[in-house]
Amino acid sequence: MKNILYIVWSDNNSVGIPIIDEQHRGIISTINSLHFFIQAGHGDEILKPTLIMLEQCCPK
């Protein structure tokens, strides 16, 4: 398996608003999880739950 993390959070990504930074870290974590499962050959199984999770954390 290649690199586990697709996106690495750094302080440069911070906007300085704690709640927004926390949400962004959560989104990055979700993307990294999706990336991990795709690399492991399980992308089809995790795609729908990942999209549902992102939709719930980022309502329109």
Image (cartoon, rainbow, N blue to C red):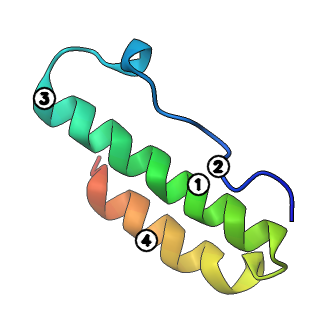
Label 1 and label 3: CA atoms lie apart by: 21 Å
- Which amino acid, mark 3? Pro
- Which amino acid, mark 4? Ile
Q: Which mark is residue 52?
A: 4
Going from the N terminus, do you reach mark 1 or mark 4 first?
A: 1
Q: Residues within 10 Å of mark 4 (few under 14, many from 20)?
A: few
Label 2 and label 3: CA atoms lie apart by: 23 Å
Q: Which mark is residue 12?
A: none
Q: Residues within 10 Å of mark 2 (few under 14, many from 20)?
A: some
Above or below residue 27? Residue 52 is below
Position in image of residue 7 (x %, y %)? 60, 38
Q: Which residue position holds label 2?
A: 5
| Residue 13 relative to residue 23: left or right | right
Q: Which residue position holds label 1?
A: 32
Q: Residues within 10 Å of mark 1 (few under 14, many from 20)?
A: some
Between circles 1 and 4, the one closer to the viewer is 1
- Which amino acid, mark 1? Asn
Residue 8 falls in which quadrant of the image? top right
